[in-house]
Image (cartoon, rainbow, N blue to C red):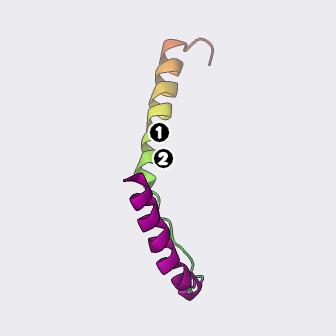
Amino acid sequence: MIGARRARAVMAMAAVAPLAGCITLEAPDEPIVIELNINITQEVIYRLAEDAGNTIDDNAEIF
């Protein structure tokens, strides 16, 4: 049983081997564009600003 599977696998690889030379890859003509979600950055900045405002309110004598 294992020998038959191995034989089928070898035959399949032998059948696919001639096709390996037909595959070509080319670089795209246009650059790849990655769009980032700016809202994530703005939310983090807003939270930091709110936290800084609370710290100033809590420690007004330092500022």
Does 6 appear in magenta?
Answer: yes
Q: Which mark is residue 41?
A: 2
Would you say the residues marked 2 and 1 are in contact, meaning their CB atoms lie under 8 Å apart?
yes
Eyeballing the image, is 16 above or below 29? Answer: above
Q: For the residue labelled by badge 2, is the local secondary structure a helix, a strand or a loop?
A: helix
Does 17 appear in magenta?
Answer: yes
Please state which of residues 22 and 37 is positioned toward the viewer in this rendering.
22
- Neighbor class of circle 1 (other Cα within 10 Å; few <14, some 14-19, many 20+) is few
Where residue 29 appears, x then y in whole percent? 57, 87
Q: Which mark is residue 20?
A: none
Tell me which amino acid carries mark 1.
Val
Where residue 3 appears, x then y in whole percent? 44, 57
| Residue at point 48%, 46% (across, down) | 41
Where residue 1 appears, x then y in whole percent? 36, 53
Q: Quadrant of the C terminus?
A: top right
Tell me which amino acid carries mark 2.
Thr
Please state which of residues 59 and 34 is positioned toward the viewer in this rendering.
34
Q: For the residue labelled by badge 1, is the local secondary structure a helix, a strand or a loop?
A: helix
Answer whether residue 48 is visible to the viewer in this image.
yes
Specify the segment rendered in magenta: 1-26
Where residue 13 appears, x then y in whole percent? 50, 72
Answer whether residue 23 is visible to the viewer in this image.
no
- Neighbor class of circle 2 (other Cα within 10 Å; few <14, some 14-19, many 20+) is few
Q: CA distance from mark 2 to mark 1?
A: 5 Å
Q: Which mark is residue 44?
A: 1
Q: Main secondary structure of the magenta part?
A: helix
| Residue at point 47%, 58% (across, down) | 36
